[in-house]
Image (tube, grey):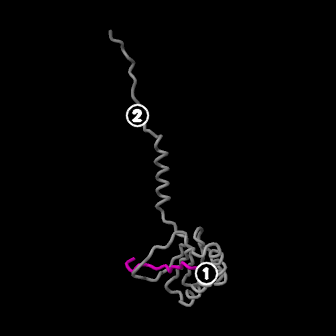
Amino acid sequence: MHVPRPRQSLASVIPTATMADIAFLLIVFFMVTTAYSLDRTPMELPATREQQQTAKGSALIAITADETIRFSEGEADTTTVDGLDGLDAAIRTVTARNRLHPFVIKADRRVKYRLIDAVLERLRLAGAENVTLLSQGEGA
């Protein structure tokens, strides 16, 4: 004997349980691949043929064309310091904790060398041993 079954229509369902996982993975992907810059001051860097990578977390000294000096210990954005004396105090706080902490000097190509030399001298007197000058590749 044949028993009639009630007809049930199948509803189409979009599985949303994995949507949260996908969204989380996309957020993590973009956070990891996004380049973060401590200093966004527009500058014309000097051109060089060879370039080296700078260490992550380096202290950054940025010198603009109008000779404004900005400083970052490597974790936060750069802030303006009060001339060479303010820079000297900022450098000494970093070197007091670690003399091998890397420093990067990012100077506009129009900055007079006497100012860069004064910054290098302050780094030397503070005992900084790992100093890099930032430049731009010729092909860029």
Q: Nearer the viewer, residue 73 or 108?
A: 73
Residue at the spot of label 2: 12
- From the image, which quarter does the N terminus lie in? top left
Give the mark count.
2
Instruction: Based on the picture, tell me whether residue 45 belongs to the magenta stretch.
Output: no
**Residue drawn at point x = 40 percent, y = 23 percent:** 8
Q: Earlier in the sequence, mark 1 or mark 2?
A: 2
> Outermost residue toward the top?
1
Indicate the position of residue 43 as horizontal and vertical percent values.
50, 79
Indicate the position of residue 80 as horizontal and vertical percent values.
63, 77
Residue 52 occupies which quadrant of the picture?
bottom left
Q: Amino acid at mark 2?
A: Ser
Question: Is 127 on the left or on the right of 20, as rendered?
Answer: right
**Residue drawn at point x = 49 percent, y = 73 percent:** 54
Mark 2 surroundings within 10 Å by alpha-carbon count, few (fewer than 14), some (14 through 19), many (20 or more): few
Q: Amino acid at mark 1?
A: Gly
Q: Is residue 46 above or below residue 7?
A: below
Give the residues drawn in magenta, as a range: 128-140
Instruction: Based on the picture, tell me whether residue 130 belongs to the magenta stretch.
Output: yes
Residue at the spot of label 1: 127
